Amino acid sequence: MKRALITGITGQDGRYLSQLLTSKGYQVFGLIAGQANPKAKLLMEENPSLDLVGGDLRDLPSLIAAVEQVQPDEVYNLGAISFVQLSFKQAELTAEITGLGVLRMLEAIRIVGGTDKNPIRFYQASSSEMFGKVRETPQKESTPFHPRSPYGVAKVFGHDMTVNYRESYDLHASSGILFNHESERRGLEFVTRKITNSLARIKLGIQDTISLGNLDSARDWGYAGDYVEAMWLMLQQDEPDDYVIATGETHTIREFLEVAFRIAGYDDWEPFVNHDTRFDRPAEVDLLLGDATKAREKLGWTPKVGFEELVTRMYESDLKSEQSNLDAGRR
Ligand code: GDR
């Protein structure tokens, strides 16, 4: 039975990946920080065979202990301060966890090592935010980085460190440059889920409007369930490498609003949306569009869920859960 250790297990991707690996027969361990983490119960309900291990990306000894205890075949480093907007307010903490956390995890793996015959394989969750002020479109593995936020800067550090450990210590360390990926499990702070959840509440008469920042930026949005498959595929290759994971389609926030409101039965979204400067960022990433040709050719990976289906799934899930909250309140 293969053993996997996942950091960031409570996040959207950690939850999908743990279920994917369990379905493939892995014993899955999730690194969880702090005492009595409020998300532990939900995780165990979703995946009862999951094991939780204490540890923190800020604390190298705890990572060494976790790797020693789990003896993993594969480590997936998904843990991070992942909200770009927050990274402007807590830049140092972002550098600490999103950046230095990668180095600590790599060190823990280098120190504990695994057997010569079966060395530990490592996946780093890199991000399209590293491309930032893009130098070319579409962006591929060779596109230079120009991050536009403390989050993006920290991700570049983690990415470069992963490449450096691969080259220096012959580690099987791969990096997935994932473009935005969303789902019913996306946090409410991210723009897609904020829109689908608010829209469901508007539809049910609980809320009147949505306050948003910049509507002109464009993102290459895929489905998180498809993207965790790519993470796993990278670690099954004989050689470690870096891969862009994207749909090859880009849409503005305006287009997301148009599609979502149409699905919900509205002709026009504009009366329901306000601009709120609190959601504008000090520096913005205007356009992301990924070229995942390498992942298609080498991993055989292609995205299955398209844009319209993604928006529909998210809206319908929010409508259902908001309706059941409403019913529970009335009872
Ligand atoms: P992003 O995702 O920064 O691309 O990073 P997010 O959904 O937060 O923002 C996307 C775009 O929408 C604009 N926007 C708003 N964003 C938020 N969150 N809230 C708003 O009210 C709002 N109004 C407009 C933003 O300015 C931005 O242009 C995500 C994260 O998951 C990262 O961790 C990951 O690495 C990248 O995707 C790939």
Image (spheres, grey):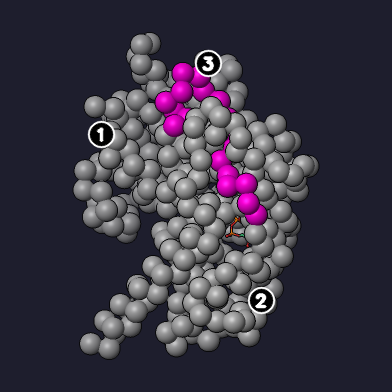
Residue 124 % position (x, y): 51, 35
Assess whether residue 248 is covered by the magenta stretch.
yes
Ligand 1's quadrant is: bottom right
- Which residue does the image show at 23% across and 55% down from the upper left? 45
Q: Secondary structure at mark 1?
A: loop
Q: Is the distance from the Cβ of mark 2 to the nearest ligand 1 atom less than 8 Å?
A: yes
Of 58 and 287, nearer the camera is 287
Of 19 and 170, nearer the camera is 19
Q: Earlier in the sequence, mark 1 or mark 3?
A: 1
**Residue of label 2:** 276
Q: Amino acid at mark 1?
A: Gly
Residue 307 % position (x, y): 54, 58
Q: Secondary structure at mark 2?
A: loop
**Residue of label 1:** 25
In the drawing, does residue 314 fall left or right of residue 23?
Answer: right
Q: Earlier in the sequence, mark 2 or mark 3?
A: 3
Q: Is the distance from the Cβ of mark 1 to the nearest ligand 1 atom less than 8 Å?
A: no
Q: Secondary structure at mark 3?
A: helix
Q: Amino acid at mark 2?
A: Asp
Q: Looking at the image, is 113 positioned above or below residue 193?
A: above
The 10 Å Cα crowd at callout 1, few under 14, some 14 to 19, many 20 or more, is few
In the drawing, does residue 190 fall left or right of residue 11?
Answer: right
User: Which region is colored magenta?
Assistant: 233-250
Assess whether residue 25 is covered by the magenta stretch.
no
Q: Nearer the viewer, mark 2 or mark 1?
A: 1
Q: Looking at the image, is 240 positioned above or below residue 159?
A: above
Identify the image quadrant of the N terminus. Answer: top left
Q: Looking at the image, is 232 positioned above or below residue 289?
A: above
**Residue of label 3:** 169
